Image (cartoon, rainbow, N blue to C red):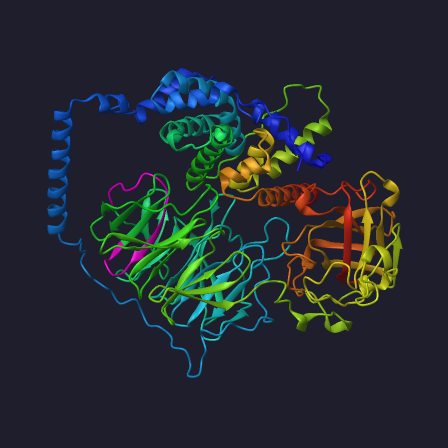
Amino acid sequence: MTDVASPAATTPAPWVAAAVRSAVAGDEAAFARIVEAYGRDLFRVAYVVAGDEALAEDAAQAAWSIAWRKLPSLRDPERLRPWLVSVAANEARQLLRSRHRRQVAEIRVRPPDDPLGDPSAVAERLDLLAAFRHLRPEDRSLLAMRYVAGLDGAEIGAVLGMSPSGVRGHLSRLLERLRKELRDG
Amino acid sequence: MAEMDAFERRVADTLLCYADEAATTLDAATVANRAALGHPRRAGSGLLPWRLVAMPWVVWVLLLAGLLVALIGGTLLVGSQRERRLPAVVPNLGPVAKCPPGSTPDKPGPVDQARPAHLLAWTPHMAFDRRAGRLVAVTEDAYLSYGLPPETWTFDVCTNTWTQMHPNREPPGFVHSYLVYDVDSDVTIGVPHRDGVSGSVWAYDLLANTWTEKGTAQGEPRFYDPVSGLVVAEGEDGLLNYDVDTDAWTPIHHANGPGSDGMLAYDASVDRVVVNAFEDPTTWLLDIRTGTWSRSGVDTPVFIEGFWWVPAVAYDEAAKRTVFLGNVRWAAYDAAADRWESLGERSSLPGPMVYDAVNRRLVNIELGGRVVAFDLASSESTVLFESDPCVTARPGLAPYRGPDSTDADGSPWIRAAKVTLHGGPFFTRVVGVADEPWVSSPPAAPATVADGLFLPECQLWTDGTVWWEETTTDPASRAWIEIGLGGTFALDAAVVQADADDAYLLSYRDPETAAWHPLWDVQPGEAGGMATRPHQGDASARRTLARPVVTDALRFEAYCGERAAGGNPSPPQPTSAPACGAQYSVSEIAVFGVPAP
């Protein structure tokens, strides 16, 4: 597995531990600072899992509510970001699943902003997103945590209760499934 | 760490671009405020230690006296309360088969018996058919490119043997689904659930060995209710009764219960549904006759670490306990006494669990396929079927020789006409002759890889195999094996036995263009030594191709070794250099098909 450049470094800034302590003690401003730092990450992951902005916003807000409530149980502030991302992915997955029971939700794919972009590249991207949509929500969560949030196998394993090698194996099979969908599609 | 290959990079870039498309305005203060409003922290943080120390001694005496009175009063109050008792309804749970005289249900089944091909990778979905005395198990759908269709199997708990049922048809798409045995109608019911979408209800009649597709599911079956004689399912808005005979759904009216998802089981001893809620672990009881909920007053154990998994659950009729099995611990809940009893810690993923009414104990299939019974009364575990690929290979099905050897569709094994080793050098180790593989192993005989002979599973990777070494930094070390088929064939399946911790690429040649195309990305296995793929320990399993390919030659090459070192998850194209270096080994490459027209 290869490291993917991440918007936020895996090692949290020094202020994070202090902010977590303050938030646990009830400091809403400290919690807002955490939201400010990681809110975008949570939303992006939720969006990739759910494929819908409104649903992603709901999932992110639900994740922050859970985070506020369960922050006292976070033993290691260094795991804050992976933990938050996993909670958001899970909330997106749950919301998506509950909506799926009523109707089949499609992941919306916008046309590219650049009309002069390479048409074949655009088509490839759309094909890949279509294949991605066929994965189970939990599998989309895993790929989003890996490639959108940039978490590594150990970080994902720690929050999912899997071994790093188990994460790698699962990712490997998901990539193969995507590859096969594109090949057979 | 290996470099990301082109496809993985493409996936990463595509998802990052896709995430960038999402537009949102984040007002951190508002988000934080909303979160905090929903769960306000207590004002202040209680008495601080220094304040306690500073209290006058009179206050200390009063405080301690008050605590003493509260302790004595509390003890008297609790001691005078009766143990919680719920009405003991104990409905008739239906007829149960008996083991024939002379049966040995505690004796493990034969290690070399046929069993579900998926067992080593995926646990099946299952229910217990109490009339037949068998577990009904449906394997996961052909997910993640394993190329194996779903299969219906039964496990006889009197003989501990698996039987593939080959019913009239197989239900598609069983992924993360539940099966429930409907005692009244004598069928096992399930709802295939894939891509987050539930499909039709499917009912399996074991006696007739037929699957019947019913109408669209409105919920997922959870348990059988012996009072109504119907299956109870969980839908979007709560529980429903499902009558398989009329294919009708009826809502069960009940008040709001736990606010999060949970696992359900029916406790016949108190006629209540036991619910273990995942979030803020709590235990609830639902009276489905009146629709009323009650919350357990005792702490609920945490069964699961990580949100990926859900605990397995089963009601033990003999012990009158509902047992929850997670990846960190398992425990039994006595609803009548409102009490949890720990059954120990665990460190493996929870597989499905059912109650074996014939032998009056729980049966669990662990990830990897081992079948284990557990008797709550005696706390004894009994292994009913050992699936370790290193000890349970199916020697009766290998080697493949001659026209009798076929794949699931009946296509015969294609005997190779010529095997050529490119690059290398390639070695084989002969036990007792060349004990140090890098020093004295003789050159390998190419035909070894296509002689129809599979080695014992988990055999040392150097013994009797064809092995070689490659490094990423030295393209000259690249090695591959070509197998000429001696004609043009339409291939539809393959099976490979190669070193467990490496990944390989099997390619085929287009006879018209002479171009090579990927046929199968052979992923690492789970055990050590030589591992048969697609399923370790089961040389009868085939990697079925989505559609036949016409070819006259195969190429086999390694692309990533020693999984533990962090493998590159994607294979390069056949013309590119290997992505990482290691020692590789293969003992058999078998393909199946018919001569191309």
- Quarter-of-image position of residue B596: bottom right
Q: Is residue B345 left or right of residue B62?
A: right
Q: Residue at x 64, y 35 (%)?
A: A128
Please state which of residues B435 and B369 is positioned toward the viewer in this rendering. Answer: B435
Spot occupied by residue B65 in the image (x, y as percentages of width and height): 12, 34
Q: Which residues are magenta?
A: B254-272
Is residue B31 on the magenta stretch?
A: no
Is residue B259 on the magenta stretch?
A: yes
Q: Is residue B553 above or below residue B136?
A: above
Q: Is residue B285 above or below residue B416?
A: above
Spot occupied by residue B295 in the image (x, y as percentages of width and height): 24, 45
Spot occupied by residue B290 in the image (x, y as percentages of width and height): 20, 50
Pick the quarter of the image with the N terminus of chain B.
Answer: top right
- Quarter-of-image position of residue B96: bottom left
Q: Is residue A158 visible?
A: yes
Q: Is residue B24 visible?
A: no
Q: Main secondary structure of the magenta part?
A: loop
Q: Residue at x 80, y 55 (%)?
A: B550
- Quarter-of-image position of residue A117: top right
